[in-house]
């Protein structure tokens, strides 16, 4: 049930992002959809994807806000502060309600989630001969996930550096 609510929230936020008249409102709605995706990953028991989604989402939104903050501010310049305040409080309220219901469904800390984790913890040090269980799991059992996460973070870093660079290419005369 919670996953369906989060998916509806993501669809609504995506529609708002597409239909918004100004860029800042579109970015806020886009970040809400990304936050919903991160919560969906948490419900689906994929915390590594949720953390990666949050990091990439935060970096991209910061870059996009930096690029659009001086270009498009009709709501602030029109003096519609009452609408801005109400929509902000509505978004915060919706976020807190969704977070309350979503985070309430997470298991208590220390409870085993799956039987596979028992196999990871019981035999990883003997099978791999590494000093740390976390290193053994990420390097041997979950190596493809780790490589994909590193590739995502690397591409986000390259995107940040490409957008925030100060000098462009010099035109040859």
Image (cartoon, rainbow, N blue to C red):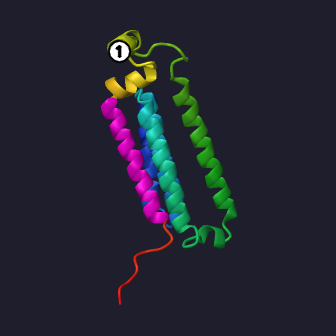
Placement of the N terminus among the 4 image quadrants: top left
Q: Which is more toward the observer, 152 or 5?
A: 152
Question: Which quadrant holds residue 149?
Answer: top left
> Looking at the picture, how far across and down is residue 13, in whole percent?
47, 50
Q: Determine whether the residue tagged by mark 1 lies in a helix, strand or loop.
A: helix
The residue drawn where x is 53% and y is 14% is 110
Residue 124 visible in the shown view: yes
Placement of the C terminus among the 4 image quadrants: bottom left
Count of labels in the image: 1
Horizontal side of 157 relative to 79 (left or right) equals left
Point out the residue furthest to the left here. 144
The residue drawn where x is 45% and y is 36% is 50
> Looking at the picture, how far across and down is residue 49, in whole percent?
41, 36
Residue 9 visible in the shown view: no
| Magenta stretch, overall SS | helix
Q: Is residue 162 magenta?
A: yes
- The residue at which mark 1 appears reads as 116
Horizontal side of 21 relative to 81 (left or right) equals left
The residue drawn where x is 59% and y is 48% is 91
Q: Which is more toward the observer, 68 or 92?
A: 68
Question: Which quadrant holds residue 104?
Answer: top right
Binning the other alpha carbons within 10 Å of mark 1 as few (below 14), some (14 to 19) or many (20 upward) gives few
**For the magenta stretch, what is the residue range?**
143-164
Q: Is residue 87 above or below residue 121?
A: below
Point out the residue furthest to the bottom here. 173
> Looking at the picture, how far across and down is residue 64, in whole percent?
50, 61
The residue drawn where x is 39% and y is 11% is 118
Question: Which quadrant holds residue 41?
Answer: top left
Q: Is residue 69 magenta?
A: no
């Amino acid at each position: 049930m919670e996953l369906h609510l989060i998916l509806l929230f993501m669809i609504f936020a995506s529609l708002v992002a597409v239909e918004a008249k100004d860029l800042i409102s579109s970015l806020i709605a886009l970040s809400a959809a990304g936050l919903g995706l991160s919560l969906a990953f948490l419900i689906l028991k994929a915390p590594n994807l949720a953390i990666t989604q949050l990091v990439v989402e935060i970096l991209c939104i910061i870059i996009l806000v930096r690029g659009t903050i001086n270009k498009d501010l009709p709501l602030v310049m029109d003096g519609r502060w009452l609408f801005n305040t109400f929509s902000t409080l509505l978004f915060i309220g919706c976020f807190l309600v969704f977070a309350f219901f979503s985070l309430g469904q997470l298991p208590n800390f220390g409870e085993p989630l799956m039987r596979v984790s028992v196999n990871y913890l019981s035999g990883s040090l003997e099978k791999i001969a590494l000093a740390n269980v976390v290193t053994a799991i990420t390097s041997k059992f979950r190596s493809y996930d780790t490589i994909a996460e590193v590739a995502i973070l690397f591409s986000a870093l390259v995107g940040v550096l490409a957008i925030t660079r100060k000098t462009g290419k010099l035109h040859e005369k």
